Structure formats: structure tokens, C-alpha cells
Image (cartoon, rainbow, N blue to C red):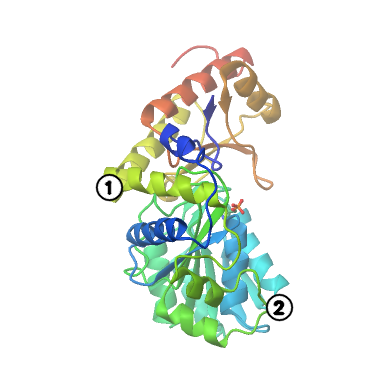
Amino acid sequence: MNLRIPGPTPCPPQVLEAMRKQMIDHRGKEFGQIMLQITARLKEFYQTKGDVLILTGSGTGSMEAAVANTLSPGDKVLSICNGTFGERFADIAETFGASVTRLRFELGKGAELAVVRKALEADPSIQAVTITHNETSTGVTNDLESLSAVVKGFDKFLMVDAISSMGCIKLPMDAWGCDVVLSGSQKGWMVPPGLAFVGLSQRAWDAVAKAKMPRFYWDFKKAKSNAEKGQTPWTPAVPIFYALAVSLELMAQEGLPNILARHERVGKAAREGAKSLGLTLFADERYASNTVTAINTPAGVDVDKLLAILRDEYDTILASSRGEMEVFRIGHLGFVTEEDIEKVIEALQLALMSMGVITCST
Ligand SMILES: *Cc1c(COP(=O)(O)O)cnc(C)c1O
């Protein structure tokens, strides 16, 4: 089966094998060693001297945790939104009592620097900014390096959803001045769902000390004091820790520059492949993501039928739309090669031919 959705992503056989191991005491020495080793490796991929906390939960849990640990009710937040996940960050902040202003950009386009600058100029009382690095719903990667420079020019607190980009698309957390950076195990990390990661700058810890939103399960201070002992405050998803230890070893062997280059190649293969079939891309190509490609559903095509044919006849699983965009999506992150994407394009061609959408190979 060619599972090509933007998470959960396929896992290498060694990673699956690692999860067959018996459970261990999560307060014992062996778990502590795994925890310390994984944390050190994650910090290398985050390129941070700050902390990276490992939470048991999905990516959204880390978004909620980031909000609840660093903000107080009534805090003014500017949420940069250009898709479903940007909106989710804003929804969470609002749910916890922040005063959220949504700065929306056209779907499929990147967030514009000048517009962000203007919004920050217009309201000096804004304390924090949320942004989605890689908007998985539209296949757009925002220019985080430049956006962060703008946000930092106004000395604001910056929270980044990097759930579908960290470890696949360049994001040196410290060099780019990000305060909170989130990711999730089932995206680029080649392990099953179950863990979320939170990178925190010193400024983030200062915010944690002052923040008054309620939190218990996701309390970062508890997570940090436990992590120092090689533990987690609550029972962790132990098998995913086994898996992550192995996948991080594989990732370290490949090396971050090679991993980033591989994602550039597969991203390009997905885009060029789709276009070679006469399909059009949803995202502005200047912002095209190297981990997920959203393809416009051709006029008159029943997208559910297309995805069903791909699944039932070509063993290829692609993702449907998240939101009102008329698209389907190819996930190409984590355990993926150009050959995997070539197979997707082949399957897509055959499926579209069988539906009478295209007639011959181009
Ligand atoms: C997948 C994803 C999330 C949500 O993560 P879950 O693990 O499904 O909770 C949030 N943001 C982005 C950008 C994502 O790709």
C-alpha cells in the first residue's frame, strides 16, 4: 500500500519492529536513557539550545499546550491564518480566553510580510503571534524566516505550528527567533501518531512563568522537571518512544541537510508529476510545500470517486480536502522517496484515464 497522506505517514520496518518490545517501567533507568537520548536528538533537528519537551498526545495537543502555558486570558494574539490549521491555532487561543485577531490571507497564498507588519503597527497591544509554518490544508509553506524577522522587529512572542514541517523543511528554531515550535510524531518523523514535541526558547519560559491560563495535563513546568530526571509527568506512549529512538537514529544517519534535500526532490516530483497529467496546483508555486501538495480537483470529477479508485484499484491512499477547497492532497513527508511519488503519479494517471478525465499518457 502506498500511503501518501500528510500523516500518519508510513514507518520504516526497523521502526515498526522496535515497537514489538515488551513494556518497561516508565520511571526506570532504561526509559530514562531513551528519553534523554531522544530529547538530545530532537534538539539537534530543531537546531535549538533551548528545550524540546515530548508530550504524549497528537499535534493539536501541543497547540493547546502552547497556548495554555504561555498566555493569560485577555492577552492579545494575532493569528496568521491561511488555511485550516492556522484557524485551529486561533480557535484554541480563543477557547482559552485570549483576545484573538485573525489576519487572513487568500487560501493557497503565503502570508504577506507587509500586511503582517501593518497589523502589528496598527495594534501595539498585541502580545503574541501564531503562525502555521507549513499549512497542510493548502500545501503552502509560509516564509517563516522573513515573517519571524518582522514579528521580532516588533518584539512579539512567536508561536509556530511546525507540525508538518519540522524535520523535513528548513526551520532552525533559534536562528529564526521562534519562541515556541510544535511538531507531531506521525508527520515527518517516520513514527506512528502519539507524541508531540514542543521547542521552547528562554523567552517562552519567561512567558510560562507569567501565564495564567489553566493547565494541568499539559503543564510545561511539570514536563520539564520530569524530563530532567528522564521521565514524563504522566504515563507516556512507551512504544512510540521505542519507535522514535530508532527513527531518530535513521534520521541522524541520513543527516538533516540530506533529509531537507530529499523533501525538496519529492516535493518537486509531486508538483511536476501532477502538472504532467494536466492537473493544476492549488498553492502559489512560490510557496509550494515540500511535504504536501494540494491538487485542484479537475472540473466535473467526483473527488471521492477518484480517491476510492486510487485506493481500491491502485493501492494508493491520498488525502481529501480539509476545508472548503476543492482539492485532493498528496502527502510526501518522512519515509518517502521520489520513486514512491512516481508511483502515485502513475496511479493517478491510470485512475484519471479510467474515469475518462484524461485520454492518453503525456
Ligand atoms: C497534522 C497537523 C496538525 C494537527 O495535528 P494532529 O496530530 O492531527 O492533532 C496541526 N497543524 C498542522 C500544520 C498539521 O499538519
Q: Residue at x 53, y 81 (%)?
A: 208
SS for callout 1: loop
Q: Quadrant of the C terminus?
A: top left
From this view, report whether residue 174 is shown above or below residue 340: below
Which label lies toward us, 2 or 1?
Answer: 1
The residue indicated by pointer 1 is: 255
Q: Indicate the position of residue 128 as horizontal and vertical percent values.
A: 54, 78
Q: Amino acid at mark 2?
A: Gly
Q: Indicate the position of residue 247 as horizontal and vertical percent values.
A: 40, 44
Q: Residue at x 43, y 25 (%)?
A: 276
SS for callout 2: loop
Q: Indicate the position of residue 347 as horizontal and vertical percent values.
A: 52, 20
From this view, report whether residue 161 is shown above or below residue 16: below
Residue 159 shows up from this direction: yes
The front one of 360 and 202 is 202
Q: Amino acid at mark 1?
A: Gly
From this view, report whether residue 161 is shown above or below residue 244: below
The residue indicated by pointer 2 is: 97
The disc at residue 303 is none
Which class describes the residues within 10 Å of circle 1: few (<14), some (14-19), or many (20+)?
few
